[in-house]
Amino acid sequence: MSHANEGVLHAYLDGALDELLGAGAQATRDHIAGCSECAEVLHEARAVRANAIAILGGTLPSVVMPPLEDLRARAAVSGAPLAAPRSRMFRVRWAASVVMALGAGWMLRGDRTEILGVMDAPTESAVSLPAFVVPAVPADVESRSASLVREATLNAEVGLSVVASTNLSEEAMLQAPSTSSALDRSVVAAVAEPISEEEPVFEDVMTDLPPRTGLREMTADVPLTFAAVDAVDAKPFGTSPPASEVLGGALEVSGEVSREVAGAERELVALAPMSTPVEENRSVEEGVRAQRAMPVSSAREATVGLALVDEPQGQGRNGRKRSDDGGAFLVPGLALISITNLGEGVIPLGAHVLQTLEDGQVLEMFHLLEGVDPNGLEPFPEDGKTGVITPREDGWLIMRANRSVEELKALIARLDGIS
Amino acid sequence: MSVDWTEVYRDTYPDLVRFLHRKVWDLQRAEDLAQEAFVRALRHEPKKPRPWLFQVAANLARDEARTVIRRKRHLTLLKSEVEELQRAAPDQSETFSEKERMARVKEALAGVSERDRDVLLLWDAGQSYTEIARQAGLAVGAVGTTLARARRRLAEAYSEGEKLDVAR
């Protein structure tokens, strides 16, 4: 009989010889037992195997098993398979006044201050927060949304703004919010898309969670009412889930989130099951999402969340405030007027920053996150400002002010700490 | 024959978590994914739950890995959380050492080819040769050879990592 090869010897050591060789296993065992040559190789194989076991064994986590009944309860929830909510790209109106050469721009990415486009300089003077254009919602969706709003007995005085068309996983529907102080001020709307198992679970949402988003900000600075579930383990969050949990996928939730913005104004985001009143705990097959966001009137309030988020990283060495991604978003030496998150529902799109230039003019910047299409911005007002757009490591920067292009370039260089 | 899920759960869950842990290198995520795999199994009721669970878990881990790569740049723990973690750590040097060790194992595993690594981790999670063969798309006869190669490569890569650390 020929000698046992290394694979057979490992199977022998693993007690898998029968699986490997079937009826021939016993003969091989006998051979190994009486063969000095095989014994030598076996000795070596034993050492290799033991070494591998020791290496892997050292990383064994101690596992706490949740009750099987919990998993049964989750499995028992009927409904569609898991799917990811999709962040959508807005492809609507592009400001006719913005001249861009995006294709060429990507070829010039190495230079952070390369200006890809220059915007026209119209005449009026105004600093206004641009809104991302809400895509048209099909009539049946609006109808269903309206019905839901009534069903959910939400406060009718709040104007609805249907902003999302996102499917929530069935896990996200496991628990509708029970009671919430925020609920009476919030709204519900929108639609569920067909759910497909092919889509990785909330991949998109997790990808799009940046440091300066509304959700993160809200988790960071105020107690939240999060009658929601983690889409992975369907665990109720309770109040104020830690940001890491949110970043771990909790965006795929049903429930509602609210935040005091300034005085009587509130920014409210509501997520709720489609076919059930939000006061009741029921599982449903479709999810809905809506938002009612009121404008931020207080710069101080508006910066609270951002400041908190950035504090761990602190100021850059020359006093520049930096985002978590390493990109500067405040021009050093200029007074801050406000920082406002841009987003669609709870899907973050970037930040809008206003600073005061030395002569009292306003410098306006839009930091758009990677993956966000600048075409989603509504046309800028004709306010006489010059605008430039440039790619950044983490997305796009649009800068506008009553300055020449060269002066804006200098400001971007200053933003980057180059000058 | 109906499946005794209590037994399957008891016998498989810890192995599944360990298997996943070495794929996602985050215990919490490994547990989440293992639970997700079980939830799906309970819903689908496969005839052979154990290999089914490992297959689903491997797919989930693959999705997870893609996601982690994409979201990595966005992850920042809040200050309070960092402080909390630091408070919770009983011994900084011990924690560091354990982390270092885990990083070395992770690195060593990365030095093993994907298929060999999968076979090794499946075996380590208690899968039989037959189950490993089915899942890895190998002939049963090739499992031993693959395991032998994977083990040797893992040990070599781990040893190389140690040498590099000493050199530093």
Image (spheres, coloured by chain):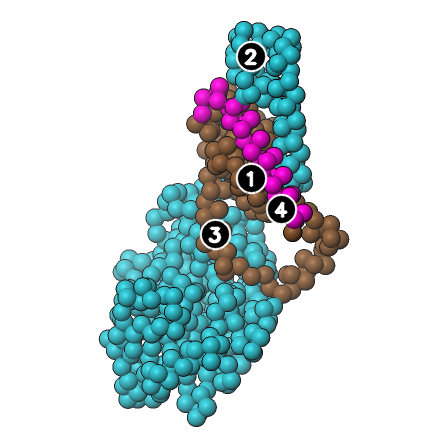
Question: Residue A243 falls in which quadrant of the image?
Answer: bottom right
Q: Name the residue under label 4.
A: B164
Q: How crowded is mark 1: few (under 14 residues within 10 Å), some or many (20 or more)?
A: many
Taking A138 as reference, is A195 left or right?
right
Rendered location of residue A290, percent (x, y): 41, 63
- Labelled pair 4, 2 in contact (Cβ < 8 Å): no
Mark 4 belongs to which subunit?
B
Query: Which circle marks residue B109 in the picture?
Result: 1
- Which stretch did the figure color magenta? B138-167
Rendered location of residue B45, percent (x, y): 48, 30
Amino acid residing under circle 3: Ile
Residue furthest toward the right? B91
Say which label, 3 or 4, has the lower sequence index.
3
Marks 3/2: CA–CA distance: 46 Å
Q: Nearer the viewer, mark 1 or mark 4?
A: 4
Q: Nearer the viewer, mark 2 or mark 1?
A: 2
User: In percent of the image, x 43 and y 65: which residue is there?
Assistant: A394
User: In percent of the image, x 56 and y 26: which residue is there?
Assistant: B148
User: In percent of the image, x 47 and y 29: which residue is there?
Assistant: B135
